[in-house]
């Protein structure tokens, strides 16, 4: 297991999410935890990093809010009622939120000594 120096931040994110959504029921709090974890997993996957970095904490909460608000209408392609029109992208999290995550690139070499000699420039 990799040490996460920001794990104490999880309670703050959960409290923020609960406040934003106005959640009071235990069932909804459990859903908040799940959506916060799901949003974190998406960020970690895109970043290729073992934990959500501090700079993505607010984004993680925003993604969890979106997931919570879409529950029951996941994958809806189109809906129009009383002048309100809904249409969702093919992803379960909006592209404008996903675009805020900068992918992290890993090197195929663990350290510089593994780089083949013809490729070294030093």
Image (cartoon, rainbow, N blue to C red):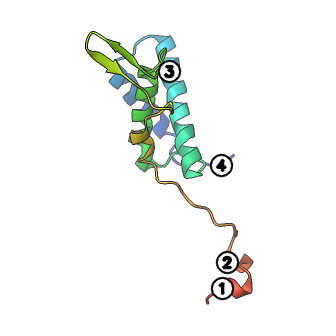
**Percent of width and height locating residue 64:** 45, 30
Crowding near the residue tagged with mark 1, few <14, some 14–19, many ≥20 C-alpha atoms within 10 Å: few
Cβ atoms under marks 1 and 3 closer than 8 Å = no
Location of residue 20 by image quarter: top left
Cβ atoms under marks 1 and 2 closer than 8 Å = yes
Kind of element beneath mark 1: loop
Q: Of the two numbered discs 2 and 4 on the same chain, state the one appearing first in sequence.
A: 4
Residue 2: give its label: 4
Crowding near the residue tagged with mark 2, few <14, some 14–19, many ≥20 C-alpha atoms within 10 Å: few
- In this image, 35 relative to 17: left or right? right
Reading the image, the residue beneath label 3 is 74
Label 1 and label 2: CA atoms lie apart by 8 Å
Examine the rendered structure and indicate whether residue 37 appears above or below residue 54.
above
Cβ atoms under marks 1 and 4 closer than 8 Å = no
Residue 61 vs residue 1, the one in the foreground: 61
Total marks shown come to 4
Residue 120: give its label: 1
Kind of element beneath mark 4: loop
**Percent of width and height locating residue 69:** 41, 21
Report the mark closest to the observer, 2 or 4. Answer: 2
Q: Is residue 51 in sight in this rendering?
A: no
Reading the image, the residue beneath label 2 is 112
x 41%, y 28%: residue = 66
Examine the rendered structure and indicate whether residue 27 appears above or below residue 59.
above
Residue 84 vs residue 104, the one in the foreground: 84
Q: Of the two numbered discs 3 and 2 on the same chain, state the one appearing first in sequence.
A: 3
Q: Of the two numbered discs 1 and 3 on the same chain, state the one appearing first in sequence.
A: 3
x 47%, y 33%: residue = 93
Q: Which residue lies most toward the left here? A: 83
Q: Of the two numbered discs 1 and 2 on the same chain, state the one appearing first in sequence.
A: 2
Label 3 and label 4: CA atoms lie apart by 33 Å
Report the mark closest to the observer, 1 or 4. Answer: 1
């Amino acid at each position: 297991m990799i040490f996460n120096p920001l794990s104490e931040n999880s309670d703050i994110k959960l409290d923020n999410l609960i406040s934003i959504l106005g959640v009071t029921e235990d069932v909804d709090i459990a859903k908040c935890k799940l959506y916060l974890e799901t949003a974190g997993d998406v960020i970690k996957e895109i970043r290729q990093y073992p934990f959500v970095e501090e700079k993505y904490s607010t984004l993680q909460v925003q993604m969890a809010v979106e997931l919570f608000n879409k529950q029951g209408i996941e994958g809806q392609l189109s809906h129009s009622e009383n002048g309100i029109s809904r249409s969702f992208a093919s992803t379960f999290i909006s592209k404008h939120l996903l675009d805020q995550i900068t992918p992290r690139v890993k090197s195929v070499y663990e350290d510089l000594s593994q780089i083949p000699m013809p490729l070294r420039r030093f």
